[in-house]
Each structure stands twice: as structure tokens, then as C-alpha cells.
């Protein structure tokens, strides 16, 4: 048995290349060693202590809530003044913002 060093597939001793990934097999029978996952460097962390990905999604969520709050405020104002026209530009602007920020 020759174990492929790339994908770990077991091939026959006579096989010259892996039957799965067609990597050229070495004559020496090396055991399959999975590669260690690369750890992100600690310097990528934000001052808030959150990983960049989490921080980004958190900020995105916060922004979405802020837009929703604005929409509710505009809606409340419209109800109070019994006028509906400010709602349309507000919704349009928010829709554009959401599209632009890709929330
Ligand atoms: Zn292979």
C-alpha cells in the first residue's frame, strides 16, 4: 500500500500516481499527515477584543438597527403629523443605504 501524501488515498504498491488526485506517488511509503490549520495572527484583532469578522458583523447589525430606528422614527412622525409623504423618501434612502452597505 502507498498512501497518497496529498489526499490520503491508499493506492496499490505498483501504482505510479494516485488514483484519486493523480499526484505522482513516491516510492517511500510516507504516512498521510494532515496539514495543520493556519492560525490567524493575533495582531489582526481589533482594540475592542473582537476578531475582525465578528466585529464587522456586529457593526453591520448595529447599523441595520440604527436604520430601522430611523425608519420607525420617521414612521412615528408621519403618524403624529398624519402626513405620509416623508415616508417614501426615507424608505428610498434607507433602501439605497442598505444596498450600498450590503447589509
Ligand atoms: Zn491523492
Image (spheres, grey):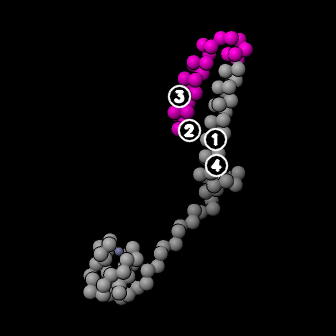
State whether residue 46 is above or below residue 80: below
Looking at the image, is mark 1 or mark 4 nearer the viewer? 1
Whether the residue carrying mark 2 lies under 8 Å from ligand 1 is answered with no
Neighbours of disc 2 within 10 Å: few (<14), some (14-19), many (20+) = few
Q: CA distance from mark 2 to mark 1?
A: 8 Å
Q: CA distance from mark 3 to mark 4?
A: 23 Å
Q: Quick check: 53 left or right of 2?
A: right
| Residue identifier under label 4 | 55
Q: How many marks?
A: 4
State whether residue 69 is above or below residue 18: above
Magenta run includes residue 80: yes
Q: CA distance from mark 1 to mark 4?
A: 10 Å
State whether residue 93 is above or below residue 46: above
Magenta run includes residue 10: no
Q: Secondary structure at mark 4?
A: helix
Find residue 83 and report its horizontal and vertical position in percent.
65, 11
Query: Which of 80 and 58 lies nearest the eye of the viewer?
Result: 80
Predominant secondary structure, magenta span = helix
Residue found 53% across the figure and 28% down from its top: 96
Query: Which of 82 and 43 lies nearest the eye of the viewer?
Result: 82
The answer to whether the residue labelled 3 contacts the one labelled 1, judged by CB atoms less than 8 Å apart, is no
| Residue identifier under label 2 | 103
Chain-order first, disc 2 or disc 4: 4
| Residue identifier under label 3 | 96
Residue found 30% across the figure and 84% down from its top: 12
Chain-order first, disc 3 or disc 2: 3
Neighbours of disc 3 within 10 Å: few (<14), some (14-19), many (20+) = few
Amino acid at each position: 500500500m502507498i498512501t497518497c501524501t496529498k489526499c490520503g488515498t491508499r493506492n496499490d504498491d505498483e501504482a505510479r500516481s494516485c488514483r484519486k488526485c493523480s499526484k505522482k506517488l513516491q516510492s517511500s511509503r510516507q504516512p498521510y499527515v494532515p496539514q495543520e490549520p493556519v492560525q490567524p495572527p493575533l495582531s489582526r484583532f481589533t482594540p475592542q477584543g473582537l476578531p475582525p469578522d465578528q466585529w464587522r458583523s456586529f457593526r453591520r447589525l448595529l447599523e441595520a438597527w440604527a436604520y430601522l430606528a430611523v425608519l420607525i422614527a420617521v414612521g412615528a412622525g408621519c403618524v403624529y403629523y398624519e402626513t405620509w409623504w416623508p415616508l417614501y423618501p426615507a424608505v428610498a434612502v434607507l433602501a439605497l443605504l442598505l444596498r450600498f452597505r450590503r447589509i
